[in-house]
């Protein structure tokens, strides 16, 4: 054990980690012993010894580190401790199973489990979330007579109740105390356990299923299965030295056990809470403090924690900076929350597995942005996966048993081989082969009497998001329509026999039910009257994962369900004969009879049903009767539904008869879509067309960013006019230059000919926009709604004085905007640069606020000029009615066809590398953003109220991606950055001809910058910005720009496009 302020020699440890053999020659407990010999000083667990869950500020830097040597020694002590305590002989050929029912701290639980396995005592991990009856069932079915309990009162009570239950059945179990941390981590010498004598099929530990549909079922894991699980993450990612926040890991769950199995395989360091009695409860808030405190780069979390963190913008900022993101398992995350996390730049990985198999997904799966609900499948097991078609585009996953791949349980035969049918329903990604998502369970499916199927799992998940709802269980198997039993949260429980409270509760949760109905197929939608509410006297029974046990709940409420269907059936039996022929006359008579018979009163043709006493239950009965009649007479085919709101949309006899006439004429329910989203849009459009369109004054349209902006603005429906403002040219017209710029950058040249675009030549001065045509200037002044100022000279070598005219132009545009006769002054968007942050303190990310200290941009004319322009705009914002928005943009990378100005510093490095024959290795990442996304994000921001925004990529690309592609595509050797700079300097100084220098070694013109970057990057971390650039916060911009939220991370394909473009223009 070591005490330090940080993990000592972290980088050296990562490099020195020796991976263990995973060929089956060692089982996992033996692998820990192997590490104690080969990687004795490598950290396995770290925690803050001064961590306080109740303190907002930690007491500081005391990090306790447990290495493989210390953990393995403690495991041997734990094995002997349990053997001595329970009387299990260490030298016996067969040893009894010892159950563990505990909520001890992480390192004590982990080490006890490891020690038992190393002593060949099979631990049976029982979830404390079980009922006493379920725990007793598990102990009896496996003939367990030894039970380890932790000292927590609720654990002791649960264990004693289970043992008492078994005693009445003639099955006796002895209770023993779980070891404490001090019992096994005490610094005393340890006596090694006898060598293990296990085969591939030898049981090593036991877990159990969650028991969703019945009692939980035990599952035995063998030595072979352990090694299979350990192999899972080996080839997916370089895990060496990664600090994984495991504060919320549930070690008695199969997810926790799998962490135990893969930690030694790949060199992950697990951050946990310090050992205490009782153990620190991992609430979302406390777990997050642990993440921050441990400087973890990835986290293994429960979905409930992730959903809680998503509500706090400050936490999102930290999670976004974690390079490894969040792995979650055991339950789904609400899709809206997961999408939001991805939008703001947090990586989330959906890890899929089960007690019987362990992890079945890739580990972690590839980050796929908004496809986060999908997972890749474990490459170690792919050869043994089979997919049984279910006839609706979904599949059941099966795993066949093989000498090379063992499964705990087989329950079917598939293709002549024993297999485990998971009963999980998988749906493939529509466009990305290899990605799958879990959409439900076969044993949860409800098959209606019509033959249509309902998958209740995602629907119940949607309802679970309501703040008043604890959980729910859908029903309807073999019935005509579905219903649902809803369990309110404890503080909202009431007696459902109180009709008033029942109706009020239904009304409160109805908007969430409507979200369910919007997601569900039509046959699965719920009516308000099909909601049963949990009786506090008959509470739901929950499984170890915290979900309702479906079968017991449905059995408990069987009489309520029967009564509800009887009520619905009685109400719908209007005893009306169906028409033999559907004519206008018979339709009218039939519909009128159904309505009058249901309402028990007559209404005239144009009287609203609901104004004359029709309620929602009666509306449901009318709809059901119409559906039955149309199906019986073959007007509607099986599986085709009427909308659940048909009576509400047609609440008079006249409108409802007309609707049914359309259906009978066309024999399709499509006929009743008389008012859909398109109709609503058309209805609103007649009013919205009266508003004027946007008029944009856009400067610098022939540059890279200006061209992209012009192309996208032209295509925006809301934009009516674009004044493309550029400097006068003696040689060519702006229109011709624009066509060429569009063509070079992969856009349609004809954009320049759009009727929306008017090219304006002029010069920006202190006084305004200098134009020869006063009438046109007045036209622009009186009509422009947005000024987007992009034009600026780009040259890092020039002094501030050279940029005087650029700064003057900003003042002129401000004066021009203030002279507008419009009631609302134009929006003003200025494209500044992150160069103004060149001297920002790298200890913390630069946030989106004005820069008060002129030292920050000092030292480069370009940056100083942009800062001066920002100062003008901040002053205008403070002293006038103008509300400019300053967007500090980062490095712009190539466009749709890879076009990237070869005068930029990155192409200069690539070109110079070709001349030198080598490419530099640089630590760090590049927050470059493609010009397409840059332009669209600026358009997103054009109506923002923010004073300052930053525009860089929220998910940067590692420099190594650029280096690897350039090395392969251009045949370059990769060399350390310092060596590359030295070669560049030597050859640049050796060249005599100035023009030849500039052509062959353009990076030589940037030697001052490159040499300075050499010192900034020394000792930097791989997740820091390359070349010592400041870290940039884009928190405000992510709120403004959907484009930036969804921006795709740059990849090898992008780099190849840049290279192809540079080759096509003769630069390379």
Image: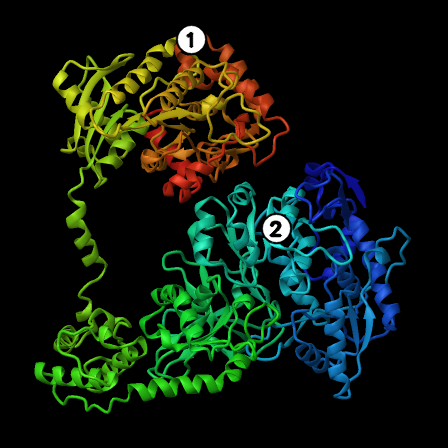
Q: Position of residue 592 (x, y in %)?
A: 16, 83
Q: Residue 114 or 856: which is nearer the viewer?
A: 856
Q: Residue 647 or 44: which is nearer the viewer?
A: 647
Q: Is the image coloured rainbow, by chain, by secondary structure, or in one colour?
A: rainbow
Q: How many numbered discs, if any?
A: 2
Q: Residue at x 46, y 84 (%)?
A: 560
Residue 736 shows in the view: no
Q: Which residue is mark 1?
A: 993
Q: Quadrant of residue 118?
A: bottom right
Q: Quadrant of residue 735?
A: top left
Position of 1008 with respect to 749 (left or right) is right
Q: Quadrant of the C terminus?
A: top left
Residue density around tag 2, few if under 14, some if 14–19, many if 20 or more, within 10 Å: some
Q: Position of residue 719 (x, y in %)?
A: 21, 36
Element type at mark 1? loop
Disc 2 to disc 1, C-alpha distance: 64 Å
Which label sits on residue 285? 2
Q: Position of residue 519 (x, y in %)?
A: 36, 65
Position of 474 with respect to 121 (left or right) is left
Position of 1039 with respect to 635 (left or right) is right
Element type at mark 2? helix
Q: Nearer the viewer, mark 2 or mark 1?
A: 2
Residue density around tag 1, few if under 14, some if 14–19, many if 20 or more, within 10 Å: few
Residue 588 shows in the view: yes
The first of marks 2 and 1 along the sequence is 2
Q: Is 125 situated above or below 311?
A: below
Q: Residue 299 or 1038: which is nearer the viewer?
A: 1038
Which label sits on residue 515? none
Q: Do callouts 2 and 1 mark residues in contact (Cβ within 8 Å)? A: no
């Amino acid at each position: 054990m070591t005490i330090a302020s940080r993990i000592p020699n972290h980088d050296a440890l990562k490099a020195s980690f020796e991976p263990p053999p995973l060929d089956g020659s060692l089982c996992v407990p033996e692998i820990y012993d192997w590490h104690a010999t080969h990687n004795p000083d490598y950290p396995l667990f770290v925690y803050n010894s001064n961590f306080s869950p109740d303190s907002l500020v930690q007491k500081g830097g005391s990090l306790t580190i447990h290495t493989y040597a210390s953990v393995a020694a403690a495991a041997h002590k734990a094995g002997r401790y349990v053997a001595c305590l329970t009387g299990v002989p260490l030298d016996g050929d067969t040893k009894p199973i010892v159950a563990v029912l505990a909520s001890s701290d992480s390192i004590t639980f982990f080490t006890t489990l490891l020690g038992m396995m190393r002593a060949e005592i099979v631990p049976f991990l029982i979830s404390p979330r079980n009922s006493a009856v379920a725990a007793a069932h598990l102990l009896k079915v496996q003939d367990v007579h030894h039970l380890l309990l932790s000292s927590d009162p609720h654990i002791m009570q649960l264990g004693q109740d289970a043992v008492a239950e078994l005693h009445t059945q003639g099955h006796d179990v002895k209770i023993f105390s779980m070891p404490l941390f001090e019992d096994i981590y005490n610094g005393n010498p340890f006596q090694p356990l006898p060598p293990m004598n296990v085969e591939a099929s030898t049981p090593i530990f036991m877990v159990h299923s969650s028991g969703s549909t019945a009692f939980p079922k035990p599952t035995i894991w063998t030595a072979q299965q352990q090694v299979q699980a350990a192999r899972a993450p080996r080839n997916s990612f370089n895990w060496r030295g990664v600090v994984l926040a495991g504060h919320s890991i549930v070690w008695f769950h199969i997810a926790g056990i799998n962490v135990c199995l893969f930690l030694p395989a790949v060199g992950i360091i697990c951050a946990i809470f310090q050992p205490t009695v009782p153990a620190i409860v991992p609430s979302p808030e406390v777990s997050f403090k642990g993440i921050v405190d441990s400087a973890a780069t990835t986290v293994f979390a429960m979905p409930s924690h992730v959903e809680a963190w998503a509500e706090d913008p400050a936490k999102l900022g930290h999670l976004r900076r974690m390079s490894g993101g969040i792995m979650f398992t055991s339950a789904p995350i609400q899709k809206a929350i997961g999408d939001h996390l991805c939008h703001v730049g947090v990586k989330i990985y959906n890890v899929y597995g089960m007690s019987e198999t362990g992890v079945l997904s890739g580990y972690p799966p590839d980050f796929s942005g908004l496809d986060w609900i999908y997972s890749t499948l474990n490459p170690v097991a792919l050869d043994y996966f089979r997919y049984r078609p279910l006839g609706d585009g979904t599949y059941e996953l099966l795993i066949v048993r093989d000498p090379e791949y063992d499964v705990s349980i087989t329950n079917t035969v598939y293709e002549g081989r024993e297999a485990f049918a998971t009963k999980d329903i998988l749906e493939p990604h529509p466009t990305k082969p290899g990605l799958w998502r879990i959409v439900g369970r076969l044993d949860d499916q409800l098959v209606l009497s019509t033959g249509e199927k309902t998958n209740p799992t995602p629907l119940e998940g949607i309802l679970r998001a309501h703040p008043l709802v604890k959980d729910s269980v859908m029903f309807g198997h073999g019935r005509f329509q579905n219903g649902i039993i809803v369990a309110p949260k404890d503080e909202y429980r009431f007696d459902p026999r109180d009709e008033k409270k029942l109706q009020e509760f239904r009304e409160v949760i109805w908007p969430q039910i409507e979200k369910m109905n919007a997601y569900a197929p039509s046959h699965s939608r719920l009516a308000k009257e099909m909601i049963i509410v949990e009786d506090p006297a008959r509470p739901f029974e929950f499984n170890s994962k915290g979900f309702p046990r479906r079968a017991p709940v449905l059995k408990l409420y069987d009489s309520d369900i029967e009564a509800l269907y009887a009520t619905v059936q009685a109400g719908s039996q209007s005893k009306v004969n169906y028409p033999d022929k559907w004519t206008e006359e018979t339709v009218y008579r039939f519909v009128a009879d159904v309505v009058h018979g249901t309402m028990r009163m007559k209404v005239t043709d144009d009287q609203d049903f609901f104004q004359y006493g029709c309620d929602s239950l009666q509306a449901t009965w009318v709809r059901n009767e119409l559906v039955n009649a149309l199906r019986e007479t073959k007007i509607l085919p099986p599986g085709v539904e009427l909308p659940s709101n048909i009576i509400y949309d047609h609440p008079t006899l006249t409108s409802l008869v007309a609707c049914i006439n359309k259906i009978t004429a066309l024999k399709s329910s499509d006929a009743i879509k008389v008012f859909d989203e398109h109709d609503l849009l058309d209805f609103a459009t007649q009013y919205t067309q009266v508003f004027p369109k946007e008029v944009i004054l856009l400067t610098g349209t022939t540059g890279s960013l200006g061209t992209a902006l012009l192309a996208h603005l032209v295509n925006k429906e809301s934009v009516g006019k674009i004044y493309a403002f550029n400097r006068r040219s003696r040689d060519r017209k702006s229109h011709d230059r624009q066509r060429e710029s569009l063509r070079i950058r992969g856009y349609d040249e004809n954009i320049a000919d759009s009727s929306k675009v008017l090219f304006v030549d002029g010069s920006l001065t202190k006084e305004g926009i200098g134009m020869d045509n006063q009438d046109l200037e007045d036209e622009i002044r009186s009509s422009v709604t947005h000024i987007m100022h992009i034009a600026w000279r780009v040259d890092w070598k020039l002094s501030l004085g050279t940029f005087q005219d650029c700064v003057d132009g900003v003042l002129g545009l401000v004066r021009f905007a203030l002279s507008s006769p419009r009631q609302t002054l134009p929006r003003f968007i200025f494209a500044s640069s992150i160069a103004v942050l060149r001297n920002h303190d790298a200890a913390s990310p630069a946030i989106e606020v004005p820069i008060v200290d002129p030292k920050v941009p000092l030292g480069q004319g370009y940056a100083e000029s942009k800062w001066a322009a920002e100062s003008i705009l901040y002053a205008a914002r403070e002293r006038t009615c103008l509300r400019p928005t300053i967007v500090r943009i980062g490095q712009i990378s190539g466009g749709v066809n890879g076009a990237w100005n070869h005068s930029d510093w990155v192409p200069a490095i690539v070109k110079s590398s070709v001349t030198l024959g080598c490419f530099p290795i640089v630590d760090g990442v590049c927050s470059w953003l493609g010009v397409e996304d840059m332009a669209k994000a600026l358009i997103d921001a054009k109506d923002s109220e923010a004073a300052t925004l930053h525009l860089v990529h929220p998910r940067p690309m590692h420099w190594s991606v650029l280096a690897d592609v350039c090395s392969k595509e251009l045949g370059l050797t990769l060399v350390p950055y310092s060596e590359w700079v030295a070669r560049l300097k030597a050859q640049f100084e050796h060249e005599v001809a100035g023009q030849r220098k500039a052509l062959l070694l353009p990076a030589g013109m940037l030697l001052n910058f490159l040499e300075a970057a050499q010192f900034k990057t020394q000792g930097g971390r791989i997740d820091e910005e390359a070349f010592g650039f400041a870290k940039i916060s884009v928190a405000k911009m992510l709120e403004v720009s959907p484009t930036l939220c969804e921006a795709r991370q740059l990849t090898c394909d992008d780099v190849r496009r840049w290279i192809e473009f540079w080759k096509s223009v003769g630069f390379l």
